[in-house]
Image (cartoon, rainbow, N blue to C red):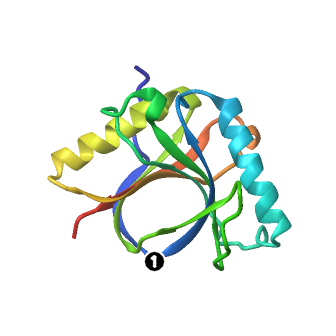
Amino acid sequence: METTTALNVEIREFPKRTFAYVSHTGPYKGDTELFGSLFTKALVWIQSEGLATNPEMETITVYHDDETVPVDQQRISVGFTISESREPTDEINIMTLPKGKYLVGSFEILPAEYETAWFEIFDYLKDKSLIPAEGPMYESYKNDPTQHPEGKHIVDICVALKN
């Protein structure tokens, strides 16, 4: 397993946000082509709706299941936060990311280090006796890794917390 350390871990209060996404069920770990395809579908829709100019837009992957769910049944939602609500389409779904407290771990990692970063967040939750809420767990991407000199991903891993 790769080693990584969070740049920062803190509890943040997030407002309610609208998330436009493409869903996928099945294997996804390490499948950069799959993620690229899902993000491209969502981005094409965001652009066609004129929503791509929002400076507060986040690029996000929501993970709906944990390791107890068989890999072929695990669900992810890949997309962008949007500034105004829209109706879902055949390919684009809309959900609300609830307001509340989230544990946020900020990382600068290589693609192979995502799993280790998640383990670090779960260890932090356990060490601090923090209890995840039923709400979302997600990654919020902060850069284009192709523009990073080392190809690293700057990402926040966010876990909703019980109050």
20 vs 14, left or right, is: right
Name the spot of residue 40 as percent of width and height, x first: 77, 47
Residue occupying the point 20% across, 56% down: 131
From this view, report whether residue 97 is shown above or below residue 139. Answer: below
Name the spot of residue 140 as percent of width and height, x first: 54, 54
Q: What is the three-letter code of the residue carrying label 1?
A: Pro
Residue occupying the point 57% across, 27% down: 30
From this view, report whether residue 90 is shown above or below residue 31. Answer: below
Q: Residue 85 sits in which quadrant? A: bottom right
Name the spot of residue 132 as percent of width and height, x first: 26, 55
Residue 5 appears in the figure: yes
Near-viewer residue (108 or 122)? 122
From this view, report whether residue 87 is shown above or below residue 6. Answer: below
In the image, farthest residue toward the left? 129
What is the secondary structure assignment of the residue under circle 1? loop
Near-viewer residue (83 or 128)? 83
106 vs 61, left or right, is: left
